[in-house]
Amino acid sequence: MVEQQRPRSKEGVANGANVPYLSILALNVRTEIAFGLARDGCTAIFWKTDTSSFLAQNWDWQEEQQKNLINLSISQEGKPSISMITEAGIIGKIGLNSRGVGVCLNAIRALGVNFQRLPCHLALRTCLESNSTEEAVLALQKSGVASACHVLVADPELAIGLEFSHIDIIELTMEQGSLTHTNHYLKQHHGVEDQMALKDSPTRFERVGHLMRELTKQLHDTGALGLEDIRSLLKDEENFPTAICRSRTDDSSIATLFNIVMDLKTRKAEVVAGKPSSAADVLYLVPGE
């Protein structure tokens, strides 16, 4: 399956970086190579109101990887333009396209891999090449995903969460205009064991839900939901160091490496490198047609 998916993209990266094609191929199937051993932690949010649609995430991974993060912009004939934050060499990650479709990723640690299905990072690329949430979901339902993960795909009107294992797909739908996820299965996947690599995942899930409820009360007095309101949720450091805005611990170098907030109605995003609670510089993503 993997060699049939976008071979020219991977070949182009390999040629441009002057590295073997198989090295780039391995990067793009690293989730499947790890075979259920992933330990990265992320918190993802979609929130739609009458006037706005925001998709956002903190991406938590080993601090040593921060220097390898890049902003990748892609233009392809007959497909939406893409702007994403990814790791150098990986052709599908977290970002949005010129049609207002965005995607986030939550790692889930569960054993099992099906090499006849689409690798996780190529599933993200599939979402970013789609014209709507529904189009992306139909494509991933058809292909399946080879390993455990949660993909949150959204456009200005609709968000759907897809919990994947190597044997099934379970859809999550919005509740009162919102959908959130961290790093554990919210639904039961028969025949699959969620190993809960990050024990703080349920705590972060409950915490972000609490913060959203509190912010909803405030909005009755202050007005419309804004991009900075969404970022404020992801700045939260309660339960430090394993908070929504994560810091490294004595036994783990995993920390929040970037924060992204996508305004899907305006088709723009703001990215903060490092922890949003302390970083000041903002990178703006504006995928053009």
Image: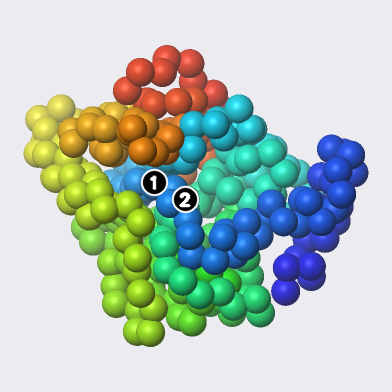
Give residue 162's position: percent from left, percent from top.
43, 67
Q: Is residue 162 left or right of residue 136?
A: left
Outermost residue to the top: 280
Q: Residues within 10 Å of mark 2 (few under 14, many from 20)?
A: many
Where residue 109 sits, quadrant-wise, is bottom left
- Distance, label 1 to label 2, CA atoms, is 9 Å
Badge 1 vs badge 2, beta-carbon distance below 8 Å:
yes
Dividing the image into 4 quarters, which one contains the N terminus?
Answer: bottom right
In this view of the protein, can residue 43 be seen by the observer? yes
Residue receiving disc 1: 42
Position of residue 92 relative to residue 117, above or below, is: above
Dividing the image into 4 quarters, which one contains the C terminus?
Answer: top right
The nearer-to-camera label among 1 and 2 is: 1
Identified at 52% across, 35% down, the residue is 268
Residue receiving disc 2: 104
Q: Which of these two is toward me, 199 or 41?
A: 199
Q: Amino acid at mark 1?
A: Cys
Give residue 99's position: percent from left, percent from top.
58, 49
Give residue 3's position: percent from left, percent from top.
79, 67
Q: Is residue 18 left or right of residue 123?
A: right
Number of callouts: 2
Secondary structure under badge 2?
strand
Position of residue 281 relative to residue 225, above or below, is: above
Q: Which of these two is toward me, 129 or 59?
A: 59
Q: Residues within 10 Å of mark 1 (few under 14, many from 20)?
A: many
First of labels 1, 2 by sequence position: 1
Identified at 61% across, 33% down, the residue is 69
In this view of the protein, can residue 126 be seen by the observer? no
Residue 93, disc: none
Outermost residue to the bottom: 191
Secondary structure under badge 1?
strand
